[in-house]
Image: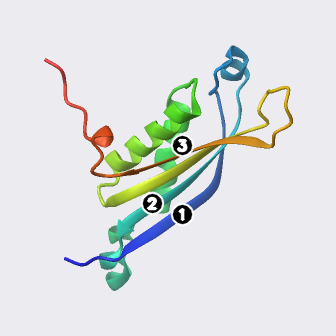
Amino acid sequence: MDTALCRLSIHNAEFYAYHGAKDAERILGGKFQVDADLFYDATAAARSDNLHFALNYERVLECIQHVVYENSYHLLETLAFRLLRALFQQFPQLHHARVRVRKLYVPLRYAVEWIEVEQEAHRDSPLFAPETPHG
């Protein structure tokens, strides 16, 4: 079956959260931005003009917000991985996704505007397979 993938892009979703390798970052918090490029088959949505068949970006933002606020992570890489995992779990129509996580106003002795991590994965990656209980 031939499909044309649609890309839904979200840019600069901003959060105040408590992530960082330093204790002070996890106590005082800081500003973070998240970008997401989400690729999915939008054929049914485009043909029907019905939100039910689309990738609802409000629900995507709710998912991103939940992950950003759910835990405090030492690494931006961990936050990006958790975002991808949650997006694949919550949105079965996703084919592949890319997320970028930016930490603004990084407490370093060097002048940088922000630090960013980008991760990309396909749904069929074993990293994002549903977890099974051990036993």
Q: What is the C-alpha distance between the residues marked 3 and 1?
A: 16 Å
- Residue 82 horizontal/vertical position (percent): 44, 37
Q: Secondary structure at mark 3?
A: helix
Q: Which residue is mark 3?
A: 65
Front-lying residue, 57 or 85 = 85
Q: Are marks 1 and 2 in contact (CB under 8 Å)?
A: yes
Q: Residue at left 85%, top 26%?
A: 109
In front here: 51 or 94? 94
Residue, x 32% and y 41% (percent of image)? 128
Secondary structure beneath dot 2 equals strand
Position of 94 compared to 105: left or right?
Answer: left
In the picture, the disc for residue 38 is: 2
Q: Amino acid at mark 2?
A: Leu
Residue 122 lies, in percent from the top left, at 35, 53
Q: Tell which circle, 3 or 1, labels the residue nearer the N-terminal end.
A: 1
Q: Is residue 107 left or right of residue 90?
A: right
Compared to residue 52, the image places residue 48 above or below, namely below
Q: Secondary structure at mark 1?
A: strand
Q: Residue at x 57, y 28 (%)?
A: 75
Give the spatial CA distance, label 1 vs label 2: 6 Å
Three-letter amino acid code at disc 1? Answer: Ser
Q: Is residue 85 above or below residue 22?
A: below
Q: Let me know if residue 97 appears in the view.
A: yes
Q: Along the polypeptide, which appears first: circle 2 or circle 3?
A: 2
Q: Nearer the viewer, mark 3 or mark 1?
A: 1
Residue at the outermost left position: 135
Select label 2 or label 3 by which is in front.
2
Left or right: residue 124 versus residue 122 is: left
Where is residue 24, by image quadrant?
top right
- Is 27 above or below relative to 62? above
For this rendering, which residue is in front, 116 or 73? 116
* Location of mark 1 (residue): 9
